[in-house]
Structure formats: structure tokens, C-alpha cells
Image: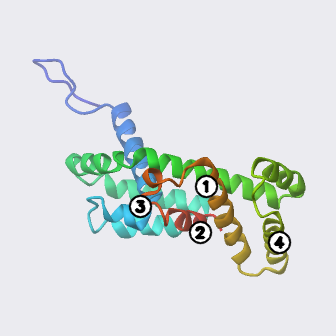
Amino acid sequence: MRGRDEETGEFLAPSRSANRREALDTLALGEALVALSQAQLARLPIPEDLLPHIRDAQRIPSHIARKRQLAFLAKQMRRLDQDMLDALRDGMSKDGDATRRETALLHRVEILRDELLAQDGDAAMTRLLTEYPHADRQHLRQLVRNTLDERKRNKPPHAFRELFRDLRELLAHDDGASDDDADAGFDDLGDGEENDHD
């Protein structure tokens, strides 16, 4: 229970709600850091002992294990002083819009890839080719077939990754998400992101 200052009546410590908000803010900051590429991380004032925890979270493909690692990362970040956390937020805000655009693009690519690989993948392929008529339909269909074959034979996901890269390139090119302003420093974000879901 928090105490009060007898003279002013003010609480002597932050409320549980304030502590929870601060913890959630730190967790959100940690998630944003994990979404960055190595080049972007290198531009931020991240303490050296925090970098391994960020890289560990980036490497974990399992949703539950990744969530646990993010919670651990946030716990380590709460040990930093507020000035350091503010410096990280300031450094990220410069790239914030581009990061959000890139993250949204990656999510769209993942959803599209899943739709193409689903049982009714032909309908998704027809929609894709209608929306992007210049797409190489033969190559995309071959990648989908190869990916399904990889899954059936329990082989490494080479075609799965190539399908992700090709879809990302197709959507980024058409949506203008790869113009110089949006793409500066984000060239390798897709590769790190794609591996998280393979």
C-alpha cells in the first residue's frame, strides 16, 4: 500500500496503474526494437548488454517463446534509467513512420503468402494477379507448388522464403513503399522479419 505525505497529501510512490502503464510502454518499446534491422539498431544508443537480448528475440520463431523473450527484454530495459529510455524513443521516432509502413507491409505479405498456400490458394492467386497484373504468374505459381512440396517432404523452407521475398518486392514496388524516403536503412528488415515466421 502506498503511503501519503502528511503535509501535502501526495502519494509517496507511483500507483499500481502507473507502474503497469510504464511496464507496458517499456514492453512496446522492446517490441519496436526487435522489429528493427541490425543497421537501424546500430544507429540507436542501445547499451551493449541489451543488444544480445534484442537479437535473441529476433531469432525466436515460436510465438510463445518470443513473447517470453520480449517480456524478459522489457524487464532488462526497466533497469535502464529514464534518460536512456527517452533517448531510445527519440532515436526511433525519426524512423517511426517508415518502420510502421515496413511492418504493415510485412504483415500484408505474410497474410498473402498464407492465403496462397491455403487449400483455396487458387482464389487468392487470382485476386493477386488481378490486383498486380504485371506479376510473374508462372514464377509465383511455381513457388507456391515448390513450397507445398517442401512442406509435404519436410524439406528446408527455401521456396517458402523466396515466395515471401518475391511477394514483398511486388507489394513494396506497387505500393511505393520502397521509395528512397521509406526504404532508407530498411533494406534488410524483410529478411530478419521473414525468418521469424518460418
Q: Which residue is mark 2?
A: 195
The residue type indicated by label 1 comes to: His
- Single out the mark in the foreground, 2 or 4: 4
The residue type indicated by label 2 comes to: Asn
Q: Nearer the viewer, residue 29 or 100?
A: 100
Query: Residue at point 40% right, 59% down?
Result: 73
Q: Residues within 10 Å of mark 2 (few under 14, many from 20)?
A: some
Question: What is the secondary structure assignment of the residue under circle 1?
Answer: helix
Q: Which residue is mark 1?
A: 173
Asked whether residue 157 is in view, the answer is no
Q: Nearer the viewer, residue 134 or 181?
A: 134
Measure the alpha-carbon separation of dots 1 and 2.
Answer: 21 Å
- Single out the mark in the foreground, 2 or 3: 3
The residue type indicated by label 3 comes to: Gly
Asked whether residue 191 is in view, the answer is yes
Q: Earlier in the sequence, mark 1 or mark 2?
A: 1
Q: Are marks 1 and 4 in contact (CB under 8 Å)?
A: no
Q: Which residue is mark 3?
A: 185
Q: Nearer the viewer, residue 14 or 100?
A: 100
Measure the alpha-carbon separation of dots 3 and 4.
Answer: 31 Å
- Single out the mark in the foreground, 3 or 1: 1
Q: Are marks 2 and 3 in contact (CB under 8 Å)?
A: no
Q: Is residue 145 above or below residue 33?
A: below
Q: Earlier in the sequence, mark 1 or mark 4?
A: 4
Q: Which residue is mark 4?
A: 142
Left or right of residue 53: residue 13: left
Which residue in the rendered view is the most extreme toward the left?
7
Q: Earlier in the sequence, mark 3 or mark 1?
A: 1
Q: Earlier in the sequence, mark 2 or mark 4?
A: 4
Query: Residue at point 81% right, 75% down?
Result: 146
